[in-house]
Amino acid sequence: MVWIKIFFLFLLFYSSIAHSAKLNEEEEMYFNFVDLNNDGVISYEEIKQSLNLLFQIIDLNQDNKISQNELNELKGIIESLR
């Protein structure tokens, strides 16, 4: 589960312009995905809830484990969001 948190946070904060004061379109999309109550800030609870939601989305067979096939599905989801 730790790698999912790291991966998700990487996606949230990754940018080709690392020192930009403004979020780019992709970063804003990830921010809005995590900001569940749309208050303009992300709480630790929102991160936990978003990770749980993401895990449920990826874990297609609901076995509480993520397989390589399910990760391939995640890659497809991420590509479709771009």
Image (cartoon, grey):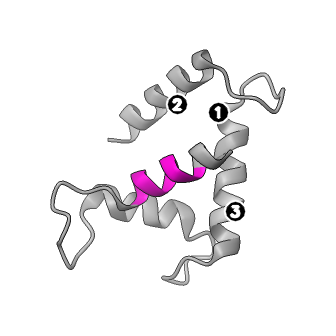
Residues in magenta?
5-12
The quadrant in which residue 3 appears is top right
Q: Is mark 2 on a helix, strand or loop?
A: helix
At label 1, which amino acid type do we have?
A: Ile
At label 3, which amino acid type do we have?
A: Lys
How far apart marks 3 and 1 lie (CA) works out to 15 Å
Residue 22 spot, x, y in % from top left: 23, 76
The quadrant in which residue 4 appears is top right
Q: Which residue lies furthest to the right in this view?
A: 63
Q: Residue 58 carries which label?
A: 1
Q: Which mark is residue 74?
A: 2
Q: Which of marks 3 and 2 is nearer the N terminus?
A: 3
Q: Residue 48 carries which label?
A: 3
Report whether 3 appears left or right of 20. right
Report whether 82 appears left or right of 49. left
77 to 18, vertically: above or below:
above
Label 2 CA crowd tier, 10 Å (few <14, some 14–19, many 20+): some
How far apart marks 1 and 2 lie (CA) works out to 6 Å
Q: Who's the residue at 72% across and 51% down the image?
A: 52
Q: Is mark 1 on a helix, strand or loop?
A: helix
Classify the position of the C terminus by image quarter: top left
Residue 7 highlighted magenta (yes or no): yes
Q: Who's the residue at 62% across and 65% down the image?
A: 47
Q: Who's the residue at 66% across and 21% down the image?
A: 67
Callout 1–callout 2 Cβ contact below 8 Å: yes
Report whether 52 appears left or right of 5. right
Q: Earlier in the sequence, mark 3 or mark 1?
A: 3
Residue 26 highlighted magenta (yes or no): no
